[in-house]
Protein backbone atom coordinates (compact mmCIF):
# COMPACT_ATOMS: atom_id res chain seq x y z
CA UNK A 1 0.00 0.00 0.00
CA UNK A 2 1.77 3.10 -1.28
CA UNK A 3 -0.03 5.43 1.12
CA UNK A 4 1.25 3.51 4.16
CA UNK A 5 4.80 3.37 2.80
CA UNK A 6 4.82 7.12 2.25
CA UNK A 7 2.79 8.39 5.20
CA UNK A 8 2.52 5.58 7.72
CA UNK A 9 -0.90 4.83 9.21
CA UNK A 10 -3.01 7.81 10.16
CA UNK A 11 -5.82 6.58 12.43
CA UNK A 12 -8.02 9.38 11.11
CA UNK A 13 -8.10 7.63 7.73
CA UNK A 14 -9.45 4.34 9.07
CA UNK A 15 -13.07 4.14 7.93
CA UNK A 16 -13.76 0.45 8.63
CA UNK A 17 -12.61 -2.17 11.10
CA UNK A 18 -13.45 -5.66 9.80
CA UNK A 19 -13.51 -8.95 11.69
CA UNK A 20 -13.43 -12.35 9.95
CA UNK A 21 -15.50 -15.38 10.84
CA UNK A 22 -13.62 -18.50 11.92
CA UNK A 23 -14.95 -19.83 15.22
CA UNK A 24 -12.42 -20.04 18.09
CA UNK A 25 -9.65 -18.66 15.89
CA UNK A 26 -10.79 -15.26 17.16
CA UNK A 27 -8.98 -15.82 20.47
CA UNK A 28 -5.72 -14.82 18.80
CA UNK A 29 -7.41 -11.46 18.06
CA UNK A 30 -8.11 -10.64 21.71
CA UNK A 31 -4.91 -8.70 22.31
CA UNK A 32 -5.21 -6.74 19.08
CA UNK A 33 -8.78 -5.68 19.87
CA UNK A 34 -7.86 -4.70 23.41
CA UNK A 35 -4.93 -2.70 22.05
CA UNK A 36 -7.35 -0.71 19.88
CA UNK A 37 -9.73 -0.17 22.80
CA UNK A 38 -7.06 0.76 25.35
CA UNK A 39 -5.34 3.23 23.01
CA UNK A 40 -8.52 4.78 21.64
CA UNK A 41 -7.05 4.23 18.17
CA UNK A 42 -10.37 3.96 16.33
CA UNK A 43 -11.88 6.96 18.11
CA UNK A 44 -9.45 9.22 16.27
CA UNK A 45 -11.08 8.54 12.92
CA UNK A 46 -14.48 10.07 13.63
CA UNK A 47 -17.12 7.54 12.57
CA UNK A 48 -15.91 4.00 11.92
CA UNK A 49 -17.87 1.06 10.54
CA UNK A 50 -17.35 -2.15 12.52
CA UNK A 51 -18.12 -5.02 10.15
CA UNK A 52 -17.98 -8.78 10.36
CA UNK A 53 -19.65 -12.16 10.40
CA UNK A 54 -20.00 -14.76 13.13
CA UNK A 55 -17.28 -14.36 15.79
CA UNK A 56 -15.99 -11.32 13.90
CA UNK A 57 -19.38 -9.65 14.28
CA UNK A 58 -19.53 -10.56 17.96
CA UNK A 59 -16.15 -8.93 18.52
CA UNK A 60 -17.43 -5.78 16.83
CA UNK A 61 -20.66 -5.73 18.84
CA UNK A 62 -18.75 -6.13 22.10
CA UNK A 63 -16.41 -3.29 21.14
CA UNK A 64 -19.45 -1.06 20.60
CA UNK A 65 -20.99 -1.69 24.05
CA UNK A 66 -21.11 0.95 26.81
CA UNK A 67 -18.21 -0.66 28.65
CA UNK A 68 -16.43 -2.36 25.74
CA UNK A 69 -13.59 -4.02 27.62
CA UNK A 70 -15.99 -5.55 30.15
CA UNK A 71 -18.39 -6.71 27.42
CA UNK A 72 -15.53 -8.16 25.40
CA UNK A 73 -14.25 -10.13 28.40
CA UNK A 74 -17.76 -11.45 29.11
CA UNK A 75 -17.95 -12.62 25.51
CA UNK A 76 -14.54 -14.28 25.73
CA UNK A 77 -15.43 -16.10 28.93
CA UNK A 78 -18.89 -17.19 27.76
CA UNK A 79 -17.61 -18.48 24.40
CA UNK A 80 -14.58 -20.31 25.78
CA UNK A 81 -16.54 -21.96 28.62
CA UNK A 82 -19.05 -23.64 26.29
CA UNK A 83 -18.86 -27.41 26.68
CA UNK A 84 -20.40 -29.68 24.03
CA UNK A 85 -20.75 -33.44 23.77
CA UNK A 86 -21.93 -35.86 21.10
CA UNK A 87 -25.35 -35.77 22.73
CA UNK A 88 -25.83 -32.14 21.72
CA UNK A 89 -28.22 -31.24 18.90
CA UNK A 90 -28.47 -28.15 16.68
CA UNK A 91 -31.13 -26.90 19.10
CA UNK A 92 -29.00 -27.31 22.24
CA UNK A 93 -25.96 -25.77 20.57
CA UNK A 94 -28.19 -22.88 19.46
CA UNK A 95 -29.26 -22.40 23.07
CA UNK A 96 -25.61 -22.24 24.15
CA UNK A 97 -24.87 -19.60 21.52
CA UNK A 98 -27.86 -17.60 22.68
CA UNK A 99 -26.23 -17.63 26.09
CA UNK A 100 -23.04 -16.23 24.56
CA UNK A 101 -24.95 -13.31 23.07
CA UNK A 102 -26.90 -12.63 26.24
CA UNK A 103 -23.69 -12.74 28.28
CA UNK A 104 -22.24 -9.62 26.66
CA UNK A 105 -25.28 -7.75 25.27
CA UNK A 106 -27.49 -6.40 28.04
CA UNK A 107 -30.64 -4.36 27.63
CA UNK A 108 -28.86 -1.03 28.06
CA UNK A 109 -26.14 -1.87 25.54
CA UNK A 110 -28.56 -2.28 22.64
CA UNK A 111 -29.82 1.34 22.40
CA UNK A 112 -26.25 2.55 23.02
CA UNK A 113 -24.95 0.51 20.07
CA UNK A 114 -27.72 1.76 17.80
CA UNK A 115 -26.93 5.39 18.64
CA UNK A 116 -23.20 4.98 19.19
CA UNK A 117 -21.18 8.21 19.30
CA UNK A 118 -18.54 7.03 16.83
CA UNK A 119 -19.29 3.47 15.60
CA UNK A 120 -21.69 2.09 13.01
CA UNK A 121 -22.25 -1.67 12.70
CA UNK A 122 -22.55 -4.09 9.78
CA UNK A 123 -23.49 -7.63 10.86
CA UNK A 124 -23.35 -10.16 8.02
CA UNK A 125 -25.91 -12.99 7.86
CA UNK A 126 -27.53 -15.09 5.14
CA UNK A 127 -31.20 -15.91 4.52
CA UNK A 128 -31.48 -19.58 3.60
CA UNK A 129 -33.44 -20.68 0.54
CA UNK A 130 -34.86 -24.00 -0.65
CA UNK A 131 -33.40 -27.10 1.03
CA UNK A 132 -30.79 -24.95 2.80
CA UNK A 133 -33.63 -23.46 4.87
CA UNK A 134 -34.74 -26.84 6.25
CA UNK A 135 -33.91 -27.87 9.81
CA UNK A 136 -34.06 -31.51 8.74
CA UNK A 137 -30.37 -32.37 8.66
CA UNK A 138 -30.58 -34.66 5.64
CA UNK A 139 -32.43 -32.07 3.60
CA UNK A 140 -30.22 -29.25 4.78
CA UNK A 141 -27.14 -31.35 4.08
CA UNK A 142 -28.27 -31.75 0.47
CA UNK A 143 -28.68 -27.98 0.29
CA UNK A 144 -25.16 -27.46 1.61
CA UNK A 145 -23.69 -29.84 -0.98
CA UNK A 146 -25.63 -28.17 -3.77
CA UNK A 147 -24.51 -24.73 -2.60
CA UNK A 148 -20.88 -25.85 -2.47
CA UNK A 149 -21.07 -27.18 -6.02
CA UNK A 150 -22.76 -24.00 -7.24
CA UNK A 151 -20.03 -21.95 -5.57
CA UNK A 152 -17.34 -23.77 -7.52
CA UNK A 153 -18.95 -22.48 -10.70
CA UNK A 154 -19.51 -18.98 -9.31
CA UNK A 155 -20.18 -17.39 -5.92
CA UNK A 156 -23.12 -15.64 -7.55
CA UNK A 157 -24.75 -19.03 -8.24
CA UNK A 158 -24.75 -19.76 -4.51
CA UNK A 159 -27.39 -17.04 -4.18
CA UNK A 160 -29.96 -19.68 -5.09
CA UNK A 161 -29.35 -21.17 -1.62
CA UNK A 162 -28.14 -18.25 0.52
CA UNK A 163 -29.08 -14.60 0.17
CA UNK A 164 -26.60 -12.15 1.68
CA UNK A 165 -28.28 -9.96 4.30
CA UNK A 166 -26.33 -7.37 6.26
CA UNK A 167 -27.89 -5.76 9.32
CA UNK A 168 -26.59 -2.23 9.84
CA UNK A 169 -26.77 0.75 12.16
CA UNK A 170 -26.03 4.36 11.37
CA UNK A 171 -27.66 7.23 9.53
CA UNK A 172 -27.58 5.43 6.17
CA UNK A 173 -26.74 2.12 4.54
CA UNK A 174 -23.02 1.30 4.52
CA UNK A 175 -21.30 2.56 1.40
CA UNK A 176 -20.32 -0.94 0.26
CA UNK A 177 -23.96 -2.05 -0.01
CA UNK A 178 -24.54 0.05 -3.12
CA UNK A 179 -21.23 -0.97 -4.70
CA UNK A 180 -21.71 -4.52 -5.95
CA UNK A 181 -22.65 -6.16 -2.65
CA UNK A 182 -25.29 -8.39 -4.33
CA UNK A 183 -27.36 -8.63 -1.20
CA UNK A 184 -29.89 -6.94 1.03
CA UNK A 185 -29.42 -4.40 3.83
CA UNK A 186 -31.73 -4.31 6.87
CA UNK A 187 -31.59 -1.73 9.64
CA UNK A 188 -30.71 -2.92 13.12
CA UNK A 189 -33.31 -2.07 15.77
CA UNK A 190 -33.85 -2.72 19.46
CA UNK A 191 -36.20 -5.52 18.43
CA UNK A 192 -33.92 -7.40 16.04
CA UNK A 193 -30.33 -6.76 17.19
CA UNK A 194 -30.05 -9.81 19.43
CA UNK A 195 -31.60 -12.05 16.76
CA UNK A 196 -29.22 -10.71 14.13
CA UNK A 197 -26.30 -11.31 16.52
CA UNK A 198 -27.44 -14.90 17.06
CA UNK A 199 -28.07 -15.50 13.35
CA UNK A 200 -24.58 -14.40 12.31
CA UNK A 201 -23.06 -17.18 14.42
CA UNK A 202 -25.53 -19.94 13.54
CA UNK A 203 -23.39 -22.29 11.49
CA UNK A 204 -25.60 -24.49 9.26
CA UNK A 205 -26.14 -28.15 10.07
CA UNK A 206 -24.45 -27.72 13.47
CA UNK A 207 -26.64 -24.95 14.89
CA UNK A 208 -30.34 -24.28 14.40
CA UNK A 209 -31.06 -21.21 12.28
CA UNK A 210 -32.89 -18.09 13.45
CA UNK A 211 -36.38 -17.79 12.00
CA UNK A 212 -38.03 -14.55 10.92
CA UNK A 213 -35.77 -11.76 12.18
CA UNK A 214 -38.03 -8.70 12.82
CA UNK A 215 -37.76 -6.07 10.11
CA UNK A 216 -36.21 -8.51 7.62
CA UNK A 217 -37.87 -10.73 4.99
CA UNK A 218 -39.36 -13.93 6.38
CA UNK A 219 -37.00 -16.88 6.38
CA UNK A 220 -34.32 -18.78 8.27
CA UNK A 221 -31.16 -16.77 8.94
CA UNK A 222 -27.75 -18.38 9.37
CA UNK A 223 -24.04 -17.67 9.70
CA UNK A 224 -22.94 -14.74 7.55
CA UNK A 225 -19.59 -16.44 7.09
CA UNK A 226 -21.14 -18.66 4.42
CA UNK A 227 -20.89 -15.76 1.97
CA UNK A 228 -18.66 -13.31 3.87
CA UNK A 229 -16.24 -15.65 5.60
CA UNK A 230 -13.19 -13.48 6.01
CA UNK A 231 -13.43 -10.55 3.61
CA UNK A 232 -15.53 -10.48 0.46
CA UNK A 233 -16.04 -6.86 -0.58
CA UNK A 234 -14.42 -3.45 -0.75
CA UNK A 235 -15.64 -1.74 2.41
CA UNK A 236 -14.29 1.65 1.28
CA UNK A 237 -15.30 1.93 -2.40
CA UNK A 238 -14.20 5.21 -3.93
CA UNK A 239 -13.10 6.47 -0.51
CA UNK A 240 -9.70 7.81 0.46
CA UNK A 241 -9.88 5.97 3.76
CA UNK A 242 -8.82 2.43 4.59
CA UNK A 243 -10.12 -0.77 6.15
CA UNK A 244 -8.19 -2.17 9.11
CA UNK A 245 -8.38 -5.96 9.17
CA UNK A 246 -6.82 -8.14 11.84
CA UNK A 247 -6.73 -11.70 10.55
CA UNK A 248 -5.55 -14.98 12.05
CA UNK A 249 -3.72 -15.99 8.84
CA UNK A 250 -2.16 -14.49 5.74
CA UNK A 251 -4.55 -15.90 3.11
CA UNK A 252 -7.92 -14.14 2.84
CA UNK A 253 -10.78 -16.52 2.01
CA UNK A 254 -13.88 -14.75 0.62
CA UNK A 255 -16.64 -17.30 1.44
CA UNK A 256 -16.90 -20.36 3.68
CA UNK A 257 -17.09 -22.72 0.69
CA UNK A 258 -13.90 -21.18 -0.74
CA UNK A 259 -11.60 -22.61 1.94
CA UNK A 260 -10.35 -25.39 -0.33
CA UNK A 261 -10.59 -23.35 -3.53
CA UNK A 262 -7.06 -22.00 -3.29
CA UNK A 263 -7.47 -19.93 -6.45
CA UNK A 264 -10.46 -17.99 -5.10
CA UNK A 265 -9.60 -14.49 -3.94
CA UNK A 266 -11.66 -11.52 -2.75
CA UNK A 267 -13.27 -9.51 -5.57
CA UNK A 268 -11.11 -7.11 -7.55
CA UNK A 269 -10.44 -3.83 -5.80
CA UNK A 270 -11.41 -5.09 -2.34
CA UNK A 271 -7.78 -5.20 -1.20
CA UNK A 272 -6.74 -1.81 -2.60
CA UNK A 273 -7.52 0.10 0.62
CA UNK A 274 -7.07 -2.76 3.06
CA UNK A 275 -4.46 -2.84 5.84
CA UNK A 276 -4.24 -6.49 6.91
CA UNK A 277 -2.46 -7.46 10.13
CA UNK A 278 -1.83 -11.10 11.03
CA UNK A 279 0.36 -13.03 13.51
CA UNK A 280 3.73 -14.24 12.31
CA UNK A 281 4.64 -17.90 12.12
CA UNK A 282 7.13 -17.30 14.93
CA UNK A 283 4.34 -16.04 17.19
CA UNK A 284 2.09 -19.00 16.35
CA UNK A 285 4.91 -21.34 17.38
CA UNK A 286 4.61 -19.90 20.92
CA UNK A 287 0.96 -20.86 21.27
CA UNK A 288 -0.26 -24.05 23.01
CA UNK A 289 0.08 -26.88 20.53
CA UNK A 290 1.97 -24.41 18.27
CA UNK A 291 -1.24 -23.49 16.49
CA UNK A 292 -4.23 -21.15 16.57
CA UNK A 293 -7.39 -22.59 18.18
CA UNK A 294 -10.12 -23.91 15.92
CA UNK A 295 -13.56 -25.48 16.13
CA UNK A 296 -12.12 -29.01 16.10
CA UNK A 297 -10.84 -28.34 19.62
CA UNK A 298 -14.37 -29.03 20.89
CA UNK A 299 -13.96 -32.60 19.60
CA UNK A 300 -10.26 -33.01 20.38
CA UNK A 301 -10.80 -32.09 24.03
CA UNK A 302 -14.33 -33.42 24.42
CA UNK A 303 -13.18 -35.50 27.40
CA UNK A 304 -10.97 -32.77 28.84
CA UNK A 305 -12.72 -29.40 28.38
CA UNK A 306 -10.61 -27.86 31.16
CA UNK A 307 -7.49 -28.35 29.02
CA UNK A 308 -9.19 -26.76 26.02
CA UNK A 309 -10.23 -23.78 28.13
CA UNK A 310 -6.72 -23.47 29.57
CA UNK A 311 -5.22 -23.40 26.07
CA UNK A 312 -7.70 -20.83 24.81
CA UNK A 313 -7.07 -18.63 27.84
CA UNK A 314 -3.34 -18.87 27.20
CA UNK A 315 -3.78 -17.87 23.55
CA UNK A 316 -5.79 -14.85 24.67
CA UNK A 317 -3.10 -13.88 27.17
CA UNK A 318 -0.23 -14.28 24.72
CA UNK A 319 -2.09 -12.28 22.06
CA UNK A 320 -1.83 -9.08 24.11
CA UNK A 321 1.61 -8.45 22.63
CA UNK A 322 0.05 -8.22 19.15
CA UNK A 323 -2.05 -5.20 20.07
CA UNK A 324 0.79 -3.51 21.90
CA UNK A 325 3.18 -4.09 19.01
CA UNK A 326 0.72 -2.78 16.42
CA UNK A 327 0.12 0.47 18.29
CA UNK A 328 3.86 0.98 18.86
CA UNK A 329 4.66 0.18 15.22
CA UNK A 330 2.08 2.69 13.99
CA UNK A 331 2.98 5.47 16.43
CA UNK A 332 6.72 5.11 15.82
CA UNK A 333 6.25 5.12 12.04
CA UNK A 334 8.08 1.80 11.68
CA UNK A 335 5.06 0.38 9.90
CA UNK A 336 6.18 2.18 6.73
CA UNK A 337 9.10 -0.21 6.49
CA UNK A 338 7.12 -3.34 7.32
CA UNK A 339 4.07 -3.13 5.08
CA UNK A 340 3.92 -5.41 2.04
CA UNK A 341 1.46 -5.54 -0.87
CA UNK A 342 -1.38 -8.06 -0.66
Image: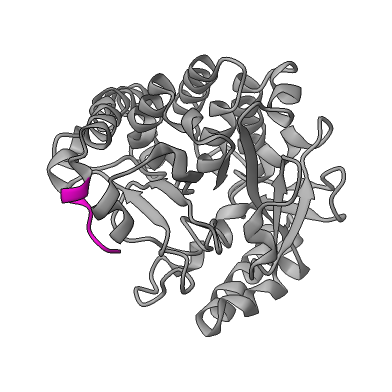
Q: Residue at left 64%, top 80%?
A: 157
The magenta segment is: 336-342
Residue 172 shown left or right of residue 198 in the figure: right
Q: Is residue 340 magenta?
A: yes
147 or 196, nearer to the observer: 196
How has the structure been colored for display? one colour
Residue 114 shown left or right of residue 202 in the figure: right
Q: Quadrant of residue 160?
A: bottom right
Residue 30 shown left or right of residue 225 in the figure: left
Residue 171 shown left or right of residue 274 in the figure: right
Residue 29 image position (x, y, % from top left): 37, 35
In the image, residue 209 above or below residue 190: below
Q: Residue at left 71%, top 65%?
A: 183
Quadrant occupied by the C terminus: bottom left
Residue 43 image position (x, y, % from top left): 50, 28
Q: Is residue 255 magenta?
A: no
Q: Residue at left 56%, top 62%?
A: 237
Amino acid sequence: MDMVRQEGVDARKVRVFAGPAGGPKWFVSVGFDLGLMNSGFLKRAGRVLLAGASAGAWRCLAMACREPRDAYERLRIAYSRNVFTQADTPETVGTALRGNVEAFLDDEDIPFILDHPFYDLAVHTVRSRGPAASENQRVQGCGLIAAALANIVSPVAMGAFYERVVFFSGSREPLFVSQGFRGRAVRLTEVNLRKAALATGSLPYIIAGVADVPGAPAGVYRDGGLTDYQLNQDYCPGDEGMTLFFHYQERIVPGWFDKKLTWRRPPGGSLDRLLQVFPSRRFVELLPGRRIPDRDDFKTFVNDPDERIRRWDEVSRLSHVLGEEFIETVESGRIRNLVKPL
